Amino acid sequence: MSVLAIDAGTTGVTALVVTEDGRIESRGYQEFAQHFPEPGWVEHNPEDIWQATLAACAAALAGAASTPGCVGITNQRETAVLWGRHTLAAPRRAVVWQDRRTAGICERLRSQGHEPRVSELTGLRLDPYFTATKLTWLAEHDPRAWDEVRSGDVVVGTVDSYLIARLTAGARHVTDPSNASRTLLYGLDSGGWEEELCELFGVPVGALPEIVPNYGPLGRTDPGAFLGLDLPISGVAGDQQAALFGQTCFGVGDVKCTYGTGSFILTNTGGEIVRSEAGLLTTVAWQTPAGELTYALEGSVFVTGAAVQWLRDGLGLIGTAPESEAVARTVPDSGGVVFVPALTGLGAPYWDPEARGLITGITRGTTRAHLVRATLEAIAFEVRDVVEAMTGDSAPVLKADGGGSGNNLLMQLQADQLGTVVERPVIQETTALGAAFLAGLGSGVWASADELRKTWQLDRRFEPGERDDAAYERWRAAVSLASQR
C-alpha cells in the first residue's frame, strides 16, 4: 500500500506518493501567490493553498500505479488562518509565519513582564514568528472577522487544521502537538491549550482545534471535497518535526538541518523537556496514539535559501538558485566579504526582529562571485551558531535535507564549519517523507520505527576539512553590527 503525502509549504504545495519501501513513485507541485501588503507583512489566501493542494494531489495521483491507502499532511507552521466553521470560507488572508507586523505587540507584552511566564509554559519566546501574536493583531485590527471568531461562526488554526477541515468537508477541526506547540498557546507540561495564555493573547479557546496525536485515525477525506477519494487521514506534523521524522532521527541526540527558505535545526531530546538558555526553542516533536510525547530543541534561522533567491530576484547576480554553487566555486573564498542575511530580522540564537541585512568587507576587487560565496558561507555560519548553542560544540553527525542540501559546496562548507560529518539522504524531500511515514505508521503500512530506518538511504557523506575560524570571527562581528539600531 502506498501513502499520499501533502506538504503545504510557504510558497507552494508538494504532493508525493510514497511506496512501502520508501520510494517516491510520483509527485505533483503547485505554487500559490504571495502577498506583501506592507513592508514586513506576508499573507496567503487560504483558498489559494487549498486549490494548490488539489492541483498537486491530482498530478501526483495521475502518476501513481494505484490509489494510495492513506493521507499524511505536513505544513508551514505558525501561520494564522481563519475560516468559517460551516462554510469553510476564509474571511481574510492568513498571516504567514514570516510576517513581522506584531513586533510592537511582542514588545508591549514584554514590557508588561509577560515573557518569563510565556516561556515557562511554552518553551518559546515573544516573537512575531509565532501564531498567538498574529491572532492578537487580528483581534485589534480586523474587528469584523474577529467578531465572527467570538460568535463561534469562524474558527482559527494553522495550515494543517485548515487543510484537514477542507479534506473532511468540515467534519474535523483538529491539530497535532507539533503544530500546537508553535502557537504560544500550548503548554509543554500540560500537553494542551492553556487558558492563561488564551486569555493573555485574547483567543477564545472554543475557536481552537482539538489536539490529536501525530498518527492514527485522525479523520477521513470527503469524496465530494477531495478528488472523489475516501481515505483515512492518518498522519500530520509541522514541517520541521516531519523532516526530523523523515530523517529517521528517532534517537536522543539525533540532529537534522532542513535547508529551505530558512534553515531549521532540530535535535531529538526524547521524553525530556529540555529548556535552553542559549536562544533555542523547546518544542514537541511528535506524540504517539498512546500519548507518549517526544520533544526537540530547535534553532530557527529565518533567511538562508531566501538569501540565494534574493541574489537571483533582487540583485540579478545569478539566473537560478543552483547556479550559486558554480559561481561561488570560481573564487577560493569570499575575499573578506561578509553577508549577514537578516532580511526579516535575526532568528536563533540572536532573536532580533529589528536587525537588518548587512554586507561588509567590500573592496574594489569584490566581484559577484565573492558575494555569492559569502551568501553560502553565511548559511554555514548561521547553522554553526545554532548547532554550537544546541550541543555546546558540534553534533556527531548532521543530517541535511531540503533544497539547499543539494548544493555540494554549501554542504562541504557546513561540514568544515561544524567540524563534523554532514550526511545527505537520497530523498531530500524529507518533510513530505516524514508526513508519509507518520501516515503509514497510523494506517499499518509500517509497523515500527525500525522498519522506517531501513528505508533511509545515504546519497553523500561530507567529511570535515580545514575550518576557517577567522572568517567565522568576521561573521560574528558583522552580526553585532547588523543588530545595532
Image (spheres, helix red, strand yellow):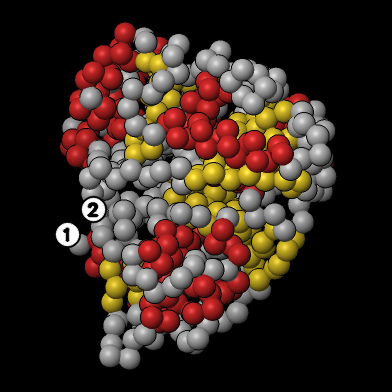
Q: Front-most of 480 and 103?
A: 103
- Labelled pair 1, 2 in contact (Cβ < 8 Å): yes
Image height of 186 relative to 57, above or below: above
Image height of 464 relative to 444, above or below: below
Q: Residues within 10 Å of mark 1 (few under 14, many from 20)?
A: few
The first of marks 1 and 2 along the sequence is 2
- The structure residue drawn at horizontal position 56% and vertical position 58%, both measured from the top left corner, is 403
Q: Position of residue 298 (x, y in %)?
A: 49, 47
Q: Amino acid at mark 1?
A: Arg
Do we see residue 351 in this rendering? yes
Do we see residue 211 in this rendering? no
Label 1 element class: loop
Count the marks. 2
Tag of residue 354:
2
Give left or right: position of 391 versus 126: right
Instruction: Check disc 1 and report the residue beneath it.
Output: 485
Q: Amino acid at mark 2?
A: Glu
- The structure residue drawn at horizontal position 38% and vertical position 23%, both measured from the top left corner, is 90
- The structure residue drawn at horizontal position 61% and vertical position 58%, both measured from the top left corner, is 400
Q: Front-most of 236 and 183?
A: 236
Q: Position of residue 295 (x, y in %)?
A: 56, 37
Give left or right: position of 450 versus 99: right
Q: Position of residue 328 (x, y in %)?
A: 48, 79
